[in-house]
Image (cartoon, helix red, strand yellow):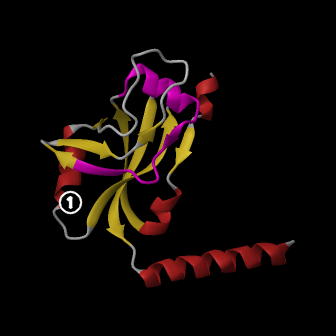
Amino acid sequence: MSDKGVNILNRKAGFEYHTDIKFTAGLVLTGTEVKSIRNGNANISDAYCMMEDGELIIKNMHISEFKQGSFNQHETLRNRKLLLNKTELRKITSRLKEKGTAVFPIKLYAGERGFLKLDIGVGKGKKAFDKRDDIKARDIQRELAKIKF
């Protein structure tokens, strides 16, 4: 299957948030959105998730228009419903009641059966000193890798 190549990452997620829990969710998409994502024309770096009416919605996820599509094009920044079971939704809502907790997308990919999946994380935002510590640890790992060879 050529769908295995779909792999869109949110590189800011690891830098901006401490991830406490991860979930894998399905997405409610239209046909032109799926084709555009399979071409790699999606961006989740500015996206975020919110609870609305007991459902988890991803907002600000940009999926470019499908060039070969006809007049049935989708909106590029529309809100999309995430598919999770009730226990997962309960866990997320209970965590969101804590102050400073956010739900954010981590990775968009094609699953084993070809369906598009979105990994989401629940966690708290990092402070400036946490980010500096991460940069320092990354630099140390890079220097150690140079020394080994």
Q: Provide the residue designation for mark 1.
A: 96
Query: Is residue 110 in view from this perspective?
Result: yes
Q: Position of residue 19 (x, y in %)?
A: 40, 62
Q: Residue at x 57, y 40 (%)?
A: 7
Furthest-left residue in this view: 53
Q: Residue at x 51, y 25 (%)?
A: 66
Q: Position of residue 130 (x, y in %)?
A: 45, 80
39 or 90, which is in the foreground? 39
Q: Residue at x 39, y 17 (%)?
A: 72
Magenta span of residues:
29-50
Give the side of residue 81 with respect to residue 121, left or right.
Answer: left
For the residue marked with disc 1, what is the amino acid?
Leu
Give the side of residue 36 with respect to residue 2, left or right.
Answer: left
Q: Quadrant of residue 1?
A: top right
Queried whether the magenta region covers residue 98, the answer comes back as no
Q: Position of residue 64 (x, y in %)?
A: 48, 35
Q: Is residue 132 above or below residue 87?
A: below
91 or 55, which is in the foreground? 55
